[in-house]
Image: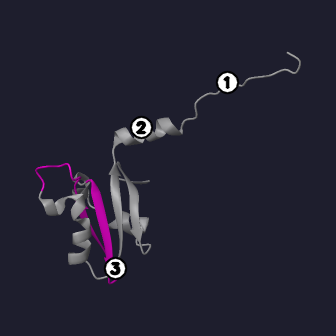
Amino acid sequence: MITIDHMNFELVENYRDAFDEKVFIEKYSELLNKYDYIVGDVGYEKLRLAGFYKNSKRKVEPDKRVNAIEEYLNEYCNFGCAYFILRKVSKQELKEQAEKSVPEPTEEVNEEAGS
């Protein structure tokens, strides 16, 4: 889990080990807060970031939806470049994950021999 500007992200893909948290934090801009996915590609040792929305967002241009990421990588990035994809994790998802990670209390059953 990566946290920046009170936003939480999950690393979905890390092709050719492109993700470097320190470099990402330095390059990150609050303009990216509105996106559901962030793609980072590395070319000539420079990180470039692009934002994409969930496919379910209807008032968004098709080339800015998550299903256009592969086309973006093929059309606008250097062939075979290292890249990563981050997905924004909602507060609701964080809450659900926290609830799942808390172990439920278990009752210990003491069986005594001869009972």
Q: Residue at label 1? A: 107
Along the line of sight, the residue nearer the viewer: 114 or 51? 114
Q: Residue at label 2? A: 95
Q: CA distance from mark 2 to mark 3?
A: 35 Å
Q: Is residue 10 left or right of residue 34?
A: right
Dot 1 amino acid type: Glu
Looking at the rendered structure, the number of numbered marks drawn on it comes to 3
Residue at 41% x, 37% y: name it: 95
Can you tell which quarter of the image residue 38 is in? Answer: bottom left
Dot 2 amino acid type: Lys
Dot 3 amino acid type: Cys
In the rendered image, residue 82, in percent from the top left (x then y), is placed at 37, 76
In the rendered image, residue 29, in percent from the top left (x then y), is placed at 26, 61
Q: Nearer the N terminus, badge 1 or badge 2?
A: 2
Q: Residue at label 3? A: 81
Q: Which of the image's four quarters has the C terminus?
A: top right
Q: Is residue 64 left or right of residue 90?
A: left
In the rendered image, residue 7, in percent from the top left (x then y), is placed at 34, 50
